Amino acid sequence: MNEQTLTQNSASGAPRSPASFASSSRWLLWSGIIMLCAWVLVPIYLVALGALGGRQGVYQWPKSFLPTGISLEPFILFLTTEGVVHSFFNSLGAAGITVALSILLGAPAGYALARYNFWGKDSYRLLVLLTRAFPLAILALPLTVSFIRLGLYDTVLGVGLIHTVLALPFAALVTQGIFLGVPKELEEAAWVFGCTRLQAFFKVVAPLALPGLVATAVFAFVISWNEVFAASVLTVRNRTLTAYLLTVLSESPMHYRFAGGLLLILPSVVFIFAVRRYLFAIWGISSK
């Protein structure tokens, strides 16, 4: 009897097999992925239901999770509101300027931080971060005066420049990490085979760093698309979509507000979906 008890105790205390541990880890991984997807997608789905369901769909209670009474008429009516399309293209223009300048200025800075050791390197990194320490509310008046003098006030270019300032520290520091993940030996091998530094960068380093650069572009786009304070202060007639909706939708019906929220969400989702291949590839670089 004692031997049987000892045998059962030893069996219950035996370590788990690698197969059961792997299945548990896989179950936890997929549970986390499902929860993360629900955290992101469920609010977007509810906003879409409110935008496409009209006044009745917004105030319906209890709410039905399945789409009922969906119509594009409220969303189309919102799009035909005066100023919405114009502000939408203003936002696209400002975001495009932000993405282009963030990559053109941030990538060389990140490459220099990753490849060269120079005096004040750590201080430079700190100064790059400190540019985000100054709130735009303090700089609103000086920026407005300067933009009026330079002829940039109430222009898409002016808004794009301010958004570039907001996104540039992120772009420089993230691209530094991306270039650190590209082995320097590959670049040196290109030099041995006759490439100049510039040729080696574009033929060897840039293709390997492309997923990281695309990820940087995505975040720069999102920063510009969602920013509202600078766009509200520095524009009057050429407002971006976020600044325009902030002033227009305060007195609008609730389903119009949902339509405006959906219009703000869709471009970012479409942009990220379009470059998803490069975003997934970034994990291959970061693991090297």
Image: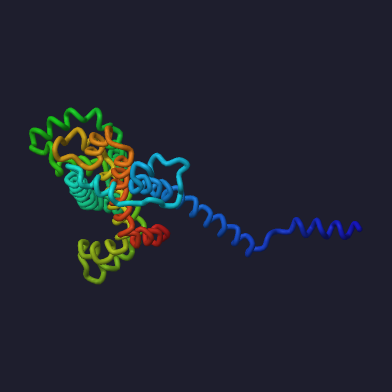
Query: Relative to 205, is 157 on the left or the right?
Result: left
Rendering coords of residue 38 (x, y %) = 46, 50
Q: Quadrant of residue 90?
A: top left
Relative depth, front residue between 273 and 127: 273
Query: Relative to 15, is 160 on the left or the right?
Result: left
Asked if residue 96 shows in the view, the reply is yes
Relative depth, front residue between 105 and 84: 84
Rendering coords of residue 236 (x, y %) = 15, 35
Asked if residue 172 shows in the view, the reply is no
Rendering coords of residue 124 (x, y %) = 28, 41
Picture residue at 23% right of the left edge, 38% below the top: 243
As drawn, 1 above or below 140: below
Rendering coords of residue 102 (x, y %) = 23, 49
The single residue placed furthest to the right in the displayed view is 1
Q: Quadrant of the N terminus?
A: bottom right
As drawn, 93 above or below 162: below
Relative depth, front residue between 110 and 20: 20
As drawn, 104 above or below 19: above
As drawn, 57 above or below 277: above
Relative depth, front residue between 259 and 141: 259
Query: Relative to 65, is 25 on the left or the right?
Result: right
State the count of labels: 0
Picture residue at 25% right of the left edge, 32% below the top: 136
Q: Quadrant of residue 188?
A: bottom left
